[in-house]
Image: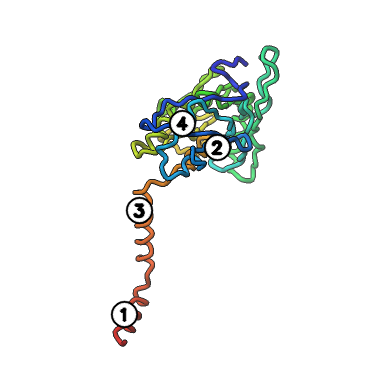
Amino acid sequence: MGRALREPNTVQVSVKTELKNNGVSNGNTERRVDGRLNLHGSNGATGYENSAPAYFYLLPPQGSISDFRLQVRLFYHGQLVQDLVSSSPEGCFILQGSAPVGSEKIYGPCAAERVFFPQLDSASAASGIVDAMSRLLPHLEKGVLVWVAPDGIFIKRFCQGRVYWDGPLAEHREKPNKLERERTCKLMDMQIFLHELHRHIHAAGPRPRYEIDLCFGEEFPDIGQPKSRKLITAQVVPLFAKELISRLPVPQDLRVERRTEAEIQNIQNINPSAMEGRRGAELQK
C-alpha cells in the first residue's frame, strides 16, 4: 500500500494557520491532556471559553494536532450496528475480512485499527434486505482506509465493491461522488476547515462541515433515496473538529433568540383558567 500524501505513519501532525486576529498579539500556549490538544490563552483560560474569542487563534501558528481520533458509526439499512472510536495515528480500516498487506515489505506493518462490519442479524430486517447485504459484504473485503494527516482527512479504497461519499470536499451534493480504487481522496481540508471556523466565530459564515458519510455498493448522495434506506453506510467524524466546534461560544444574538423562544414557550404553557382565577382573586382584594 503506497503512502502518498503522507499516508498513515505520522506521530505528530503540525498545522499552520493562515488566520489573522486583527493585529492582536498571540499569547497562546498549548497543553496536551490524554493526547488531545487544549488551547490556552495568556490569561490561562481555555480557547473558546474566553469571553473575547478574537484574542485566540484557532490553533497556534506553530501548533500541532495530536488528536487522531475518528468516530466510526456503521449502519445497516439506517439502523446503527456499530459505534466506536479509532485513536491510531495510522487511521482505521473499515472492512469485511482482511486488510491489504501488499506493501508491508516496503513500509512495515500497518498499525491502522480495523473496524469490521458486524455479522448480519436476519431477525432484524426483511429477508430481501438481508440477502442483498449478504451479496454485498464479500465485495467489501480489504475495505477502505481513513486517516488524519497534517492537511486534512484522507481515504483510500481497496475493496472491489464501489464506495461513494459525501462530506466537506465532495464535488456534488445531490449526485454521487465515487471513490476510485487504489486512489487517495481528500475528504476534508484542514486550512479550509479552520478558515470557515474563523468566519463562523465572527458571524461571517455557517458552521463548517466536518462529518463524512460513506455508502457501500450504492450510489450516494442520491436524491431519489435517503441515506437511511441504503444497505450499508458509515459516518466518520474527526473528533478534533467536533471538539473545536463544541467549544465555540454561543453568539449573543442566538442567546437572545433562544431566551425569546423559551419565554414564548412559557407563555404558551400558561393555563388560561388559572389566569382567570388569579385575576378574579385580585379583583376581590
Q: Amino acid at mark 1?
A: Arg
Few, some or many C-alpha atoms within 10 Å of disc 1 (few <14, some 14-19, many ≥20)?
few
Query: Which is closer to the viewer, label 4 or label 1?
Result: 1
Report which residue position mark 2 lands on: 38
Q: Amino acid at mark 3?
A: Val
Disc ID at residue 167 = 4
**Badge 4 or badge 1: first in the primary sequence:** 4
Q: Quadrant of the N terminus?
A: top right
Report which residue position mark 3 lands on: 256
Query: Which is closer to the viewer, label 3 or label 2?
Result: 2
Query: Which is closer to the viewer, label 2 or label 4?
Result: 2
Q: Are marks 3 and 4 in contact (CB under 8 Å)?
A: no
Q: What's the CA distance linking mark 3 and mark 4? A: 31 Å
Q: Amino acid at mark 4?
A: Gly
Dot 1 falls on a residue whose secondary structure is helix
Report which residue position mark 1 lands on: 279
